[in-house]
Amino acid sequence: MASGIAPISFRYGSLTESDSFRLILLQPSSSHRAALQCTLLHTTLSQCDRDIIDHYTALSYVWGDSNKTGSIYVDGHSFTITATLEAALRDLRDPSRVLRIWADALCIDQSNMTERNSQVALMAQIYSIAHHTVIHLGSLTESYEIILRAAPSNTTGVVSKQIPIDDLASLAATSLLRLPWFSRVWIFQELVLSRDPWFQCGNLRARWTDICNILVPAGVVSNPSGRPKELQMLANMNSARVGGRQRMVVLLTARRGLGATDPRDFIFAHMFLAADTDTVIRYVKVDYTKPCAEVFEDAARFLLEEVGPGGSVKFFPHAIKDQTSKIEGLASWAPDWSLPYAGLVPMYCENLTRRLLLNPGPHYAFVSRPLILAHVGYEVDVVTAFSLVLPDPSEFDLASRQRYQKVADDLENLYGAGAWWSGDEQGQHRHIDLHGKEARHEELCLELADKWLHMLSGDLLSTQNGLLEDDVETHKRFLPQFRLWLEERAKKGLIMVGGDSDGMESLMWLYMTLADYPAVLTGRRLAVTKSGRAAVVPKQVRNGDMAVFLAGSLVSLILRPSLEIPNESLKREIKSAFKAKKAIQTDSWKQDRLACDLENLPIQRCSLIGECHLEGEIGWNYGEERENIYTIFALR
């Protein structure tokens, strides 16, 4: 939300009740160009909910450019408003009757932070109690008029001549549905909670339900194939109106990266719409005096502690930032919902080995302000070299991919009947019988390595634009180390390609297979570690970053050590936090807890970079406790 600008002569009256709010009494005029005149009515939501005569209409619109302004007279005083609000009120104004309207920029004293906080918390009720909501999209154009006139509820009373549905849908997808209103964060709450929403362009209105029935008839949500994304978006929004409430994490995930003048509204605009609102508000309060980073971190704390099951397993992928966060001071472990989702395929997780089952709950704690996430884990390895970011494999030269595929096919033919399985207390393992073909297998594996290195040293460099010299040099230092790893793997008689391959071999084969589909490697880097192992790492990685397993996580994470040494105050806070958790543990927590003194583990300050897969590392392997190397990672 932005700020309305009122002259000194205008004063808002106080809102005295817990559900007090204001309505605009918009005075009539037969002239569209006449100055806007209104008075402000102080009332309560409970009174309006009981009133069967004087209803009010909620207005949903886009604030637009704050430098483009209009004006309205409020109780005789000139008041500056946005140009989009002025246009909406002019189009709504009746020639003979007073209209009762709620519009956020005018009905809330935007300069009063206490009032703003309390009114934003009431917005869900304001839209649900309003008898109608008008979605004002702007001026009326020829294409918008064609669409709105197709609805039987349009305010002209005349339905335009029959237009083929496909033509009407295509027209909407390339015009009306691309308007800014559809990409703003607040509109979802306004729409979902509204009893009777209407589209309006200029002075022409039509019911939301009628427009949706025409443009996205029943079935489009379950069968969206071939439909423009704009129509699918409309179908999803309409489905949300009639469906049940969704959890906060679902709402945030689905709508991250949408437009918001104030990034805090990514949280505030969804928290009273969520199915788990009662839990969310224990962690997050609507407070525009708080820095955005603090609001996002409070929301992250809610997600980590309440979303479960799985805790960190589900939480950390949301926190990975594919772009540089614009939220000043935001913790590395807190999702930045103003950024779009990175679009990466979920990190590979070895699922054929028995693991030490750990409930993350007893093994982390939030301390201090700004919040620090103290999480028990252990270091596995350190990154020493890494490649350029791997593009979509389709960007590689087709001939190079075909040469790779030829060698991969020869290897699969060599495997014949495929893999056989063995198992022990550590899990299940796949093997092949080469029956005297070991030399041929090694030869083909080395050929496969040559094809990979050719693509990494030649094709990959040609796909990259605007590379810095340091990036190229870093990549060149990686290549000989990666060659050594590939040659070592070729000697081991492993399953290198095909559906029976596993781990790094499986990820590399899936990335290069000619059947194009999203791959784990796309958008990430290959790396080599201090111990000589290969890994898949996030594109933000640096040499010296650690691969770490945190308690409860099924994949390793890349953490960046900080030069800052934990001070005694932080150590005491962390020790006290884990001691308090130990005191309230349930029996189930005791069963899923590491058998070590969590309160007195060494502490290391780090930041979270992203998820990782490290060749040969299972993490929390069944029967292997590592008390001597456990650390509390203080993440900021």
Image (cartoon, rainbow, N blue to C red):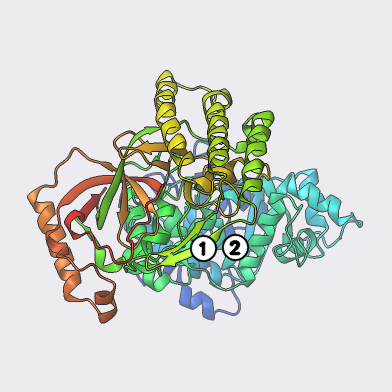
Residue 563 versus residue 229 in the image, above or below: above
Q: Position of residue 588 (x, y in %)?
A: 29, 78
Q: Earlier in the sequence, mark 1 or mark 2?
A: 2
Q: Residue at x 30, y 44 (%)?
A: 381
Q: Amino acid under label 1?
A: Trp
Q: Name the secondary structure under disc 2.
A: helix
Q: Position of residue 259 (x, y in %)?
A: 52, 47
Q: Position of residue 400 (x, y in %)?
A: 64, 30
Observer-nearest residue: 78 or 255? Answer: 255
Residue 609 versus residue 433 in the image, above or below: above
Apparent side of residue 10 relative to residue 564 in the rendered image (left or right):
right
Q: Amino acid under label 2?
A: Leu
In terms of image quadrants, where is residue 224?
bottom right
Which residue is identified by label 1?
Answer: 421
Closer to the observer: label 1 or label 2?
Answer: 1
Observer-nearest residue: 38 or 245? Answer: 245
Circle number at residue 556:
none
Observer-nearest residue: 408 or 510? Answer: 408
Observer-nearest residue: 551 or 276? Answer: 551
Which residue is identified by label 2?
Answer: 191
Q: Residues within 10 Å of mark 1 (few under 14, many from 20)?
A: few
Q: Residue at x 11, y 60 (%)?
A: 600
- Cα separation, mark 1 vs mark 2, equals 55 Å
In terms of image quadrants, where is residue 531?
top left
Q: Residue at x 14, y 53 (%)?
A: 602
| Residue 154 can be seen in this image | yes
Residue 65 versus residue 127 in the image, above or below: above
